[in-house]
Amino acid sequence: METSYQRCLRMAVALEDLVAQEAAALESRDYTEVSILQDRAAPLVDFLAQNASTHCGDIALRNRIAAVQQLRARSSALLASEMARTRAELHESQHAQRQVAKVAPAYARSASIRAKLCAVG
């Protein structure tokens, strides 16, 4: 039978693996995989958060969990910077679309005039 400590250790090892996979997915910009991995990690995080203080008291295990937290913090920072970059690109694209919308009527009129002149001539 598995002890509480062994269960916590097994959950921590599984979480380490998922967090490492998540970091690799972020590096390769595979955001769909990141989302899947985060969903898979959520129950492990919940378990460790609820049981770490009472059943997972070993200092070595706590250090492993702290290392996972640090890697997650780096991944979160990378994801946040990527989201900021994407937002900036979206803002630039929207600005360009507004600029085109402002000048498009002038080009549309001259194109229709040219078409009329060509049809007459």
Image (cartoon, rainbow, N blue to C red):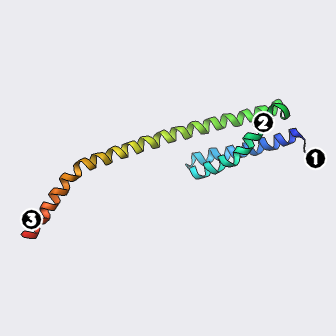
Distance from disc 2 to disc 1, alpha carbons, whole Å, reads 21 Å
Which residue, given by chain and number where applicable, does mark 3 sit on? 117
Q: Is residue 49 above or below residue 23?
A: above
- Determine whether the residue tagged by mark 2 lies in a helix, strand or loop: helix
- Binning the other alpha carbons within 10 Å of mark 1 as few (below 14), some (14 to 19) or many (20 upward) gives few
Q: Residue at x 65, y 46 (%)?
A: 38
In the picture, the disc for residue 50 is 2
Asked if the residues shown at circle 2 and circle 3 are in contact, with their CB atoms under 8 angstroms apart, the answer is no
Outermost residue, right side:
1
| Tag 1: amino acid | Met
* 86 sits to left or right of 74: left
Looking at the rendered image, the disc whose residue lies closer to the viewer, 2 or 3, is 2
Q: CA distance from mark 3 to mark 1?
A: 90 Å
- Disc with the residue nearer the chain's start (2 vs 1): 1
The answer to whether mark 3 and mark 1 are in CB contact below 8 A is: no
Residue type indicated by callout 2: Gln
Does any portion of residue 55 appear in the rendered image? Answer: yes
Under circle 1, the secondary element is: loop
Residue 27: image location, x then y, percent: 58, 45
Q: Name the residue beneath numbered marker 1.
A: 1
Name the residue located 41 percent from the left edge and 44 percent from the top edge.
89
Residue 30 appears in the figure = no
Give residue 79's position: percent from left, percent from top: 56, 41
Per the model, the C-alpha gap separating discs 2 and 3 is 78 Å
Secondary element under disc 3, as helix, strand or loop, is: helix
